[in-house]
Structure formats: C-alpha cells, structure tokens
Image (cartoon, rainbow, N blue to C red):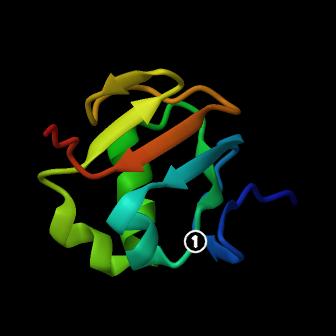
C-alpha cells in the first residue's frame, strides 16, 4: 500500500489518498528572512494548491510570520499574486514585506 505524504521542512504532514506532491521553493526577504532565520526553504504541496495553502504551511513552521500576514507581498515567478493563485510544480515563491519608497 503506497502513501503520498506532504513533506515540509523535514516533517511529514498528513497527505495521502493518491494526492501527488509538487515541490516549490520559498524565498524570504528583509525582516521576514530575519524572523525565519533562513533565506529559502523547499516545500512539497499537493497539486492544485494555492498560495493560501502554502502560507498555511509556512505559518505552521514559522509562526512569527503570521503577524505579518495582512501586509506581506507574495511573488510567483516575476509577478505579484493573491492568495488564490494556483501554484505550479517547481515554482519559486517570494515572500516579502511591503515595498516602501523614499
């Protein structure tokens, strides 16, 4: 009996039922990098996952980021996206604080 599990940062969280995982790389910028203590992290998500699904996983591993949820910007590839954006396998996701000009 085979079981597909969603692998996130060395921990397994319950995915099964034949759902295929896809790998995405998340890059953290500015103070969000300081809060996580890392530049980037790979996540395996179920196919069809959205940015919102990914954020749930990120916040589970980095709870300090949740306080910034309303203000962070999310980039997929070279575009800013909303939380309903579907993620494709192998995409690079950028998580950053709001951009301030001066």
The C terminus, quarter of image: top left
Q: Residue at x 16, y 37 (%)?
A: 101
For the view shown, which residue lies furthest in the front direction?
102
Q: Determine whether the residue tagged by mark 1 lies in a helix, strand or loop.
A: loop
Residue projecting furthest to the top: 79
Looking at this rendering, what residue extends furthest in the right direction? 1
Q: Quadrant of residue 99?
A: top left
Q: How many marks?
A: 1
Q: Nearer the viewer, residue 32 or 93?
A: 32
**Left or right of 5 in this view: 28:** left
Measuring 51% from the left and 30% from the top, which residue is drawn there? Answer: 87
Instruction: Name above or below for residue 15 compared with residue 100.
Output: below
Across and down, in percent, residue 96 comes to 35, 49
Q: Is 67 left, or right, of 7 in this rendering?
A: left
Residue in the picture at 35% in, 39% down: 74
Q: Position of residue 63 (x, y in %)?
A: 33, 79
Q: Position of residue 61 (x, y in %)?
A: 47, 76
Q: In this orientation, which residue lies closer to the viewer: 60 or 65?
A: 65
Front residue of this view, candidates 54 and 30 = 30
Is 77 placed left or right of 1 in the picture? left
Q: Is residue 72 above or below residue 99?
A: below
Identify the residue under disc 1.
38
Mark 1 crowd level (few <14, some 14–19, many ≥20, 10 Å Cα):
few
């Amino acid at each position: 009996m085979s079981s597909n599990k969603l692998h996130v940062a060395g921990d397994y969280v319950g995915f099964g039922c034949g759902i295929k995982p896809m790998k995405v790389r998340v890059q953290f910028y500015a103070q969000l990098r300081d809060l996580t203590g890392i530049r980037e992290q790979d996540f395996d998500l179920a196919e069809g996952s959205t940015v919102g699904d990914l954020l749930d996983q990120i916040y589970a591993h980095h709870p300090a980021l949740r306080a910034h949820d309303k203000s962070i910007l999310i980039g997929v590839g070279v575009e800013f996206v909303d939380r309903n954006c579907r993620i494709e396998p192998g995409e690079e996701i950028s998580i950053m604080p709001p951009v301030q000009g001066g």
